[in-house]
Structures are given as C-alpha cells and as structure tokens.
Amino acid sequence: MQAFVRRLSESLYALAVTLWVGGLWAIGFMAAPALFASLKDRVLAGEVAGNLFGLIAWVGIACAAYSMAYLSLRRGKSVFRSGAFWLVLAMLALITLVIKTILERRLDEGQIPRDH
C-alpha cells in the first residue's frame, strides 16, 4: 500500500508540473496569439485571453501548492537545498506578483475593462 501511495504522489507531482507548464505554454504561445489573429474585435480577444490567463494562474497556484507540499514531505528539511523547490516557489511568487500587482493595478486604473 505504501508503494502505491508513493507512486500515486509521484505521478500527481509530474501531472501537476506538466499541467502547469503546459497550460502556460498553450495559452501564452498558442491561444492568446490565435485569439488576436482571428478575432476582429481586439477588446473581445483581450477579454478572452485575460480570462484564460486568470484561469491558468489559479491552476498554477494549485499545482504549485501541491508541488511544494510534495517536495516538502518527500525531502524533509533538505527541501531548502532543492532547486525544484525554489523554482516552484519563484514561479508561484511570479504568478502572484503579476496577477495581484500588475493586472489588478491596471484594472483599478481602468486600463483594462473590468466585468461587473
């Protein structure tokens, strides 16, 4: 049973990282440019792309939380010497920084339309 739980947690970790990074690539380099290229209404394209980025940000936060918990439980105190842990923490901080400071500030200043 313990081996099953270990394999399951390792598989979920790999799935979380793949989902997070793959989602960022898919939205950032395929979906958003395709929206702007195919839709004549740039405001609509921007709103849809913004919604997609918001969704993938929440996916990233969830994946980062699981990844950090997995790495912490797996490696114990040595997790702080792990490059993977610091990379996940940096990516999580970047997502939070971008969403909460840059995008939220632009929404508050009216540079990006806010849905009501």
Image (spheres, helix red, strand yellow):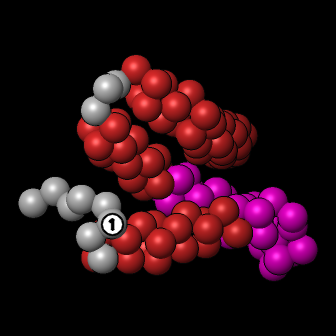
Q: Nearer the viewer, residue 82 or 28?
A: 28
Whether residue 114 appears in this view of the structure is: yes
Residue bearing mark 1: 111
Badge 1 local density, few (<14 within 10 Å), some, or many (20+)?
Answer: few
Q: Most extreme residue toward the top, as rendered?
A: 38
Q: Amino acid at mark 1?
A: Gln
Give the residue drawn at x 87%, y 67%. Answer: 82
Residue range corresponding to the magenta coloring: 60-89
Q: Is residue 38 above or below residue 81?
A: above
Q: Residue at x 50, y 60 (%)?
A: 61
Corner quadrant of residue 58:
bottom left
Q: Point out residue 49 in the picture as x, y percentages from the top left corner.
A: 39, 41
Q: Position of residue 7 (x, y in %)?
A: 70, 38
Query: Where's the C terminus, which quadrant?
Result: bottom left
**In the figure, 55 relative to 41: above or below?**
below
Q: Reply yes or no: does residue 76 show up in magenta.
A: yes
**View extreme (left): residue:** 116
Give percent across and percent down for residue 44. Answer: 27, 38
Position in image of residue 85 (x %, y %): 76, 66
Location of residue 68 by image quarter: bottom right
Left or right of 15 in this view: 50: left
